[in-house]
């Protein structure tokens, strides 16, 4: 459990909050690249880290991400005209470029100096892995873009979907580091049944940490990991790697990007079909929306007969929907002072300790973790061995392989 103060410290991400400041020191996914399909396309509203923003692609193809409200009299730039290398507010015609500079101010005389003084808050953007990412922290701390493997692959090698989670980012992230739920929530829906882990090891890395798990399955050992890449990325320890990225929209809403990828070759038609079914980690959304079709308003279409049948432990269709449903059920911001944790929650405990330490370092002005971009080039652990090796040996071998992967040109 956490104190109420610690809970507030870890969950609040608005401007000026400690965790909000820490997360703003990393590159953050803002939207899909194809939401801005070409020069001078329609602007898009983006809510990110509690801030209302407008994304647009200018005449030269450059991406702008500006405060939504016009610095003149706070009309929404969403309705603006995206023309000739800038977005022009339709209220009085003030115009801003991708850097937020006021480049035209038709209501003022040519001698006016307001133009030099007025600036829209603007965040730098970069396109990687099918997404547009932004950096919202102080310019002097801007890191290089992290070498997250799925962002470096051709588009054919990955599938990305996203869905809203109507809860705080941390409880969604914690769901990704809750290994014991595999034996319950998803029972009947995973490709094989997961016994509770018999081995656990936590190791800090240069880009975050790894929780390693050993499970005995049919007389053999299955070794897997939940890997955190700061500040909110997870690599999923399955045979073909997967990843989640939980992006805070505001304190009570999260946009989860989920990725299936093959580092070596394009995904097959059959894989795409399986991912599109909604049965696995990608959910099916309402048309034209990031909201799941199975959502809190329809109780995620829980089927009590299916639940009773024993074929599905949850009675909710889709592994991803099950996760979101149960994470949302904890409330908009889970009250961790009310919990009772046990040994099955070691991953969660380590995650919180790690984040508390990181936010303390941030507040104290010390170095924050995971500033070496190459250290992000990792893969999840997923292997099988006869009984014998220890979790420590397996983790050491894995981490050596990851160091070699990180060094790859
Ligand atoms: S409010 Fe935008 S130009 Fe006046
Ligand atoms: Fe899950």
Image (cartoon, rainbow, N blue to C red):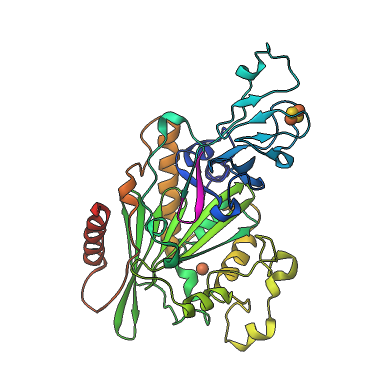
- In terms of image quarters, where does ligand 1 lie? top right
Residue 299, located in which quarter of the rendered image?
A: bottom right
The reply to whether the magenta stretch includes residue 129 is: yes
Residue 365: x and y in percent read 41, 29
The answer to whether 381 appears left or right of 307 in the picture is left
Residue 294 can be seen, yes or no: yes
Residue 381: x and y in percent read 32, 66
334 and 145: which is toward the camera: 145
Residue 4: x and y in percent read 58, 44
The reply to whether the magenta stretch includes residue 166 is: no
Residue 334 can be seen, yes or no: no
144 and 380: which is toward the camera: 144
Please identify the residue farthest to the top as the structure is shown.
Answer: 111
Residue 223, located in which quarter of the rendered image?
A: bottom left
Total number of numbered discs in the rendering = 0
Look at the magenta stretch and give its main secondary structure.
Answer: strand
The answer to whether 60 appears left or right of 379 in the picture is right
Question: Where 105 falls versus 241 (above or below)?
Answer: above
185 and 59: which is toward the camera: 59
Please identify the residue farthest to the right as the structure is shown.
Answer: 91
Region rendered in magenta = 128-135
Please identify the residue farthest to the bottom as the structure is shown.
Answer: 309
Residue occupying the point 73% across, 23% down: 106
Residue occupying the point 37% across, 32% down: 366
Residue 9: x and y in percent read 53, 41
The answer to whether 106 appears left or right of 194 in the picture is right
Question: Where 359 falls versus 243 (above or below)?
Answer: above
Residue occupying the point 54% across, 40% down: 60
């Amino acid at each position: 459990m956490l104190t109420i103060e610690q809970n507030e410290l870890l969950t609040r991400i608005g401007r000026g909050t400690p965790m909000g400041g820490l997360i703003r020191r990393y590159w953050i996914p803002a939207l899909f690249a194809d939401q801005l399909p070409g020069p001078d396309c329609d602007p898009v509203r983006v809510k990110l880290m509690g801030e209302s923003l407008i994304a647009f692609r200018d005449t030269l193809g450059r991406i702008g991400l500006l405060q939504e409200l016009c610095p003149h009299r706070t009309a929404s730039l969403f309705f603006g005209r995206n023309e000739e290398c800038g977005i022009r507010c339709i209220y009085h015609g003030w115009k801003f470029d991708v850097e937020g500079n006021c480049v035209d101010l038709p209501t003022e005389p040519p001698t006016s100096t307001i133009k030099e003084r007025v600036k829209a808050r603007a965040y730098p953007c970069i396109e990687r892995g099918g997404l547009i990412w932004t950096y919202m922290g102080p310019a002097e701390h801007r890191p290089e873009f992290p070498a997250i493997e799925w962002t470096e692959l051709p588009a054919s090698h990955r599938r990305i979907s996203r869905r809203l989670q109507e809860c705080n980012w941390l409880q969604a992230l914690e769901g990704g580091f809750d290994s014991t739920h595999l034996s319950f929530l998803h029972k009947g829906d995973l490709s094989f049944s997961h016994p509770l882990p018999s081995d656990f090891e936590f190791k800090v890395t240069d880009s975050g940490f790894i929780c390693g798990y050993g499970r005995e399955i049919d007389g053999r050992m299955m070794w897997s990991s939940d890997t955190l890449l700061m500040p909110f990325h997870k690599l999923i320890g399955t045979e073909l790697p997967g990843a989640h990225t939980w992006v805070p929209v505001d304190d009570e809403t999260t946009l989860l990007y989920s990725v299936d990828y093959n580092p070596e070759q394009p995904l097959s038609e059959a894989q795409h079909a399986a991912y599109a079914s909604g049965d696995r980690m990608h959910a099916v959304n309402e048309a034209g929306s990031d909201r799941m079709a199975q959502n809190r308003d329809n109780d995620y279409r829980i089927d009590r007969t299916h639940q009773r049948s024993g074929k599905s432990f949850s009675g909710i269709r889709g592994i991803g929907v099950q996760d979101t449903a149960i994470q949302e059920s904890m409330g908009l911001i889970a009250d961790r002072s009310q919990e009772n944790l046990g040994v099955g929650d070691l991953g969660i405990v380590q995650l919180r300790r790690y984040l508390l330490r990181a936010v303390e370092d941030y507040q104290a002005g010390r170095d924050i973790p995971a500033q070496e971009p190459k250290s992000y080039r990792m893969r999840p652990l997923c292997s099988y061995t006869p009984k014998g090796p220890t979790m420590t040996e397996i983790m050491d071998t894995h981490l050596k392989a990851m160091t070699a992967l990180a060094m790859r040109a």
